[in-house]
Amino acid sequence: MLFKKLKIFLHKIGADLVGITPADRMREAPAGHCLADFLPGTKSVISFGVRLNTTALRLLPSSRVGHMADFVEVNNLLGRLSFNALGLGI
């Protein structure tokens, strides 16, 4: 129930994609890249994403300035989504 609430919340505030999976699905990651290496005891992994401006991506390198502006804006949005998700008490 909590995962469903989190997904709905993140979509509502701007996430285009939201995924949640048990942390043990990543147990076979290469050494130094396993979640348990960084956050032992973690039970779930939450990931979310925001669409980038595909036109700016297709026109690289001539659209570098536009792409960088979009990159900064998307990363700011991802930061705000993370901060707001933490506010749910997750």
Image (cartoon, grey):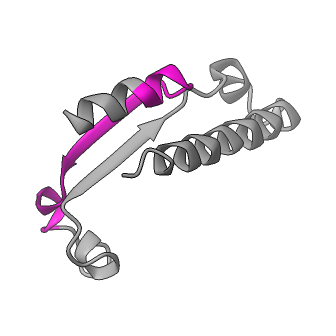
Magenta range is 9-28
Q: Is residue 73 above or below residue 59?
A: below
Residue plotted at (19% across, 46% down): 21
- Write down the quadrant of residue 23 in the picture: bottom left
Q: Is residue 69 left or right of residue 89?
A: right
Q: Is residue 45 left or right of residue 52?
A: left
Specify whether residue 34 is in view. Answer: no
Residue plotted at (20% across, 74% down): 41
User: Is residue 73 found inside the magenta-colored segment of the image?
Assistant: no
Percent x, y of residue 51: 56, 26
Residue plotted at (24% across, 81% down): 31
Percent x, y of residue 67: 77, 34
- Write down the quadrant of residue 59 in the picture: top right
Percent x, y of residue 32: 31, 81
Q: Is residue 81 above or below residue 35?
A: above
Specify whether residue 82 is in view. Answer: yes
Q: Nearer the viewer, residue 26 or 64?
A: 26
Residue plotted at (12% across, 56% down): 25
User: Is residue 21 found inside the magenta-colored segment of the image?
Assistant: yes
- Write down the quadrant of residue 28 in the picture: bottom left
Q: Nearer the viewer, residue 25 or 58?
A: 25
Q: Is residue 48 left or right of residue 27?
A: right
Percent x, y of residue 64: 82, 37
Q: Quadrant of the N terminus?
A: top left
Q: Is residue 88 above or below residue 44?
A: above
Q: Is residue 53 above or below residue 26?
A: above
